[in-house]
Amino acid sequence: MDKTRSGEQGAVPMRTDRFFAVNSAWYFATREGASIGPFENKAEAQQGLQDFLDFIQLAEPRVLSTFYASLHAATH
């Protein structure tokens, strides 16, 4: 994974796989540091990530603010 993304400039940062399994359950990690799951398999986790990204893109700013605040509270 050594490609720059749209809008990126400079050196390519290290990237990791967003998907991981724990005890046969699959999860995906968000940029905010949250683990979302469990899913029955990696394909379902990939669909879950797409659904999450759709939510992030379509949510109103106040909904996103509440969501990010709850993520922050859950990880600290």
Image (tube, rainbow, N blue to C red):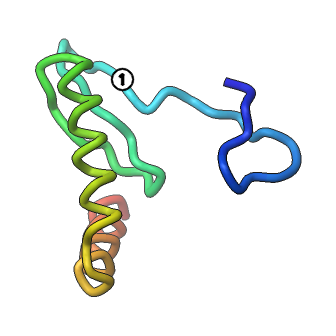
Coordinates of residue 3 in the picture (x, y in percent): 72, 31
Q: Nearer the viewer, residue 52 or 70?
A: 52
Horizontal side, residue 60 vs residue 4: left or right: left
50 or 75, which lies in front? Answer: 50
Q: Residue at x 29, y 40 (%)?
A: 49
Residue at 74%, 27% in the rendered image: 2
- Secondary structure of the residue carrying numbered label 1: strand
On screen, residue 33 above or below 66: above
Can you name the residue that lies furthest to the bottom here?
62
27, above or below 42, in the image = below
Q: Write down the quadrant of residue 62 in the picture.
A: bottom left
Give the residue pinned by disc 1. Answer: 20
Left or right: residue 67 versus residue 39 is right
Q: Nearer the viewer, residue 23 or 12?
A: 12
| Position in image of residue 58 (x %, y %) | 27, 68
Question: Which corner quadrant of the image does residue 22 belong to?
Answer: top left
Q: Tell how many labels.
A: 1
Of all residues shown, which one is farthest toward the top? 24
Assign the N terminus to one quadrant of the image. top right
Residue situated furthest right in the rendering: 10
30 horizontally vs 36: left or right:
right
Q: Position of residue 57 (x, y in %)?
A: 34, 64
Q: Residue at x 23, y 79 (%)?
A: 63
Q: Is the residue marked by circle 1 packed among few (<14), some (14-19), or many (20+) residues within 10 Å?
A: some
Q: Is residue 8 left or right of residue 9?
A: left
Residue 13 % position (x, y): 74, 40
Q: Amino acid at mark 1?
A: Phe
Which residue is painted at 26% across and 19% down in the image? Answer: 42
- Residue lying at the far front of the rendered structure: 6
Location of the C terminus (image quadrant): bottom left
